[in-house]
Structures are given as structure tokens and as C-alpha cells.
Image: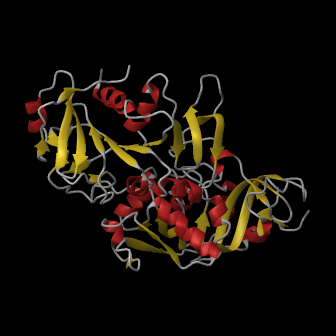
Amino acid sequence: MDDKTLIARRVALELKDGDLVNLGIGLPTMVAQYLPPGIDVSFQSENGIVGMQALPAGVSPSADLTDAGGAPIGALPGAFAFDSAMSFGLIRGGHLDITVLGGLQVDELGQLANWMVPGKMVPGMGGAMDLVSGAKRVIVAMTHTAKGAPKILKRCTLPLTSIRSVDLIVTEMAVIRTTPEGLVLSEVAPGVSVDQVLAATQAHLIVPDDVSVMAVAA
Amino acid sequence: MPGKIRSRDEIIAQFKDGQTVMCGGMHNHGTPNALIQCVIDSGARHLTVISIDSADANLTLGRLFHHRLVDKIITSYIGRNTEVVAMLEAGEIEVEFVPQGSLVERVRCGGAGLGGVLTKTGLGTVVEEGRQIVEVNGTGEKYLLETALRADIGLVRARMADPLGNLAYRGTMRNFNPLIATAADLTLVDADMLMDVDEIGIDRIGTPGVYVDMVLAK
């Protein structure tokens, strides 16, 4: 299993029946493929839909049914579309249970940086700042390191997406919870040791006695 | 008809150098493409554009940047438009980034007679720069003040329009469009279908005609 699939399968276990969920573009979108059986969630997209699904095979794409990245989607029975004001009201207003986003850096305060690299990549924040500031639960799904360099740091060096702490960090090496006391290593991936995680992490990690091995959705 | 239905030449005559133009659509979808062609044909330059993103290079809204008609864009995202990214790096365009939810609310305020809104989005990040931080009396809660935005001209895409300017939308094409319809001195509409009065239906109208000035004739 490649790293991204492992991360997506672990994140999928965080979704609870009845949740309203927003998945970011890229790796987070893969989470929808691995929903555990019996778990029924609704997916929201910032451009204004609740009840989206991947475009079903054999259904022709419509220009008037797309996700936030402009890719064609399908609408489940009961889906509804709305304008951008309602879409972000829903995000900021505490109606969105979970958002899953990619990350460039996360720090010991649980703060996420994921929208710009000054002088290199300045695409704009899109809806990321609203999602991280407003969703009830924020999950960062990202690779543990970038070209060998840790991405979980004492302090983010890149511009922050929000000062609000994220709730959970899922990487191909570990699951890390944010707590008032700091970052807690709660799970390691199969075949990965606690020491390997610590070596790949710049931030201080609290290591409880009972670090478990990461379970993943089928 | 005709009511608010106007010829292409009449619409083209509305555009002047230096105007601020708001445009609906998100990542090339729900974009008023026929009106964008009118802007290009008008020869107006040195425009300020307000939009959710800058679309893709030389596609939909992206054509305005390709033709070098825009001095400044107020937006949440330019990452997919390689031409705008290159223009920003070369200092050929000014880009003001606003979190997507805040941008939408600024436009809503502009159309609703409000001076601005208070939001947590962007608090403690680079978005704070140039913005007022407001502590609401007695609560200790801090917010960023996002001020109202209006434009000289609003470009709106709709599924249906009638001669009174009543509009109906379809699926995720609505996104920013209903907000823009409220916040410009002159609101222009590109509708897929022109309907007779009362044909859209009172419950199906998404933007009342009172907000609309001109509908592009077919």
C-alpha cells in the first residue's frame, strides 16, 4: 500500500455516521473511497453542494455539477446546491463536522500551514482558512516528511492557515493527537517504530505507554 | 420581451477603462462567458477584477488576464492560472488575496447595505495586515473586520432569465453569482435560456429582477 492510500484509509476511520464532511483536493479526496461499511456521511464542497459523490460510471459529466476544483461530480438522492455565502456560512457556523486537509507544516501548538511558500508558491488560500477556522474537527492528512525534512515542527516557519489548533494529524508513519499539553503520539503505522517517528519529527511528541499500531479501513 | 434584454452592442458600450468588475464562477464553472467576450470586445483596460479565483490560463475568466486587461485582482485563489502566477511574479498585476468565505461576505455586505462583517477567519495570520481587529464589547472575543466590497459592473451567469431580470440557477453554477448580482452599480446577466415573464415560477427564482439591470440577448 502506498503512503497516500495508507493515510486515506486511516483517516476514513475517523468519519462517523451522519457526519457532514469536507475533503480537500488531492490526498484528502481519496478518503471517500474507503468509508467503512455502515457509515453514512454527507460530503460538502465549497462551491455549494451537500450530497456530492464521485461521478458514477456511465453518467455523463455536467458543467453545472462540479466540485470545488471544477471536476465533474455526481449528486446523491437528497443532494442540494446553494450559493457561496451559504456554503461558507455552513463552514464557519459550526455545521461542518469534519474537514480533512493537506498540510505543508504543523507545529507543537497544532497550528497548520498549508497555503503558501513565500517567493515560491503563492496560489492563495482559497477556502482553507475558513475551513480550518470553522469546522468542528480538523484533520490534517499529509506525508510525515518532505524530501526527508520533518513537516511536524516546533513552530511553523511558513505562513499559518489559522491560529486554531487542528485536532488530528495522520501521516504514513503515525497518528498524532493535539492536546492542551502538546502533541501526543497515539498510533504508529505497521512496521514503524516509535523511535523512527521521533527521528522524523522536529516537534516534541508526548509518547504514552500505550502507543498502538495504526488500524486502517479496508 | 425586451424589458431588460439588451443587445450585445448595448452591453459592450457599458465597459470603460479603469472599472471594477465582479465576476461569478468558480474554476471555469458558472462563469458568464458571453459577457467576458463582451468585455474583451469593448477594449476596456486597466480593470480591477473581483472573483473567487482567476480560472485557468486563457479559459473563461482567465481570458481577461490573457488579454492583459486587468491591473488588479481581488480573489482567494490564482494557483491554477499559470499566466496570472507569472504576471504576479513579474510585477505585472496586483493580487489582493482574501479568504474565500470572507470575500463572499464582503460582497454580500456590499449588496446589503452593511459596512462589513466580523470573522475569525484569518485572525493571527498574514491576512491581518491592513485589517482592523475588533474586540466585541464585553466578550473578549477578537475578530477581523472584513469591509464591504462593491463594483461598477457585476457579471452574472444564470440558467434562466426573464425580461424583468428574474434569474434561476442550476446546480453548482450558482456559487458567487447570486451575491454578485446584488453588489454592483450595473448588473449584467448571461443566461443560458431566456424565458417569458412568469415562466420561471415564483419559487424557482434565485435572484429577483430588482437586482438586475441588463440581460444579454440571444
**Front in this rendered view, residue B51 or A213:** A213
Residue B84, compared with residue B44, is above or below; it is above
Tally of numbered tags: 0
Structure colour scheme: secondary structure
Quadrant of the frame with the N terminus of chain B: bottom right
Q: Quadrant of residue B90?
A: bottom left
**In the picture provided, is A68 more to the left or to the right than B23?**
left
Q: Residue at x 47, y 22 (%)?
A: A37
Q: Position of residue A70 (x, y in %)?
A: 54, 44
Quadrant of the frame with the C terminus of chain B: bottom right
**Front in this rendered view, residue A202 or A133:** A133
Q: Residue at x 60, y 62 (%)?
A: B23
Q: Position of residue A111 (x, y in %)?
A: 26, 54
Q: Residue at x 11, y 32 (%)?
A: A209
Q: Is residue B93 visible in this depiction of the protein? A: no
Q: Position of residue B141 (x, y in %)?
A: 36, 71
**Front in this rendered view, residue A26 or A213:** A213
Q: Quadrant of residue B7?
A: bottom right
Q: Is residue B103 visible in this depiction of the protein? A: yes
**In the picture provided, is B79 more to the left or to the right than A180?**
right
Q: Position of residue B157 (x, y in %)?
A: 69, 56
**In the picture provided, is B73 more to the left or to the right than A152?**
right
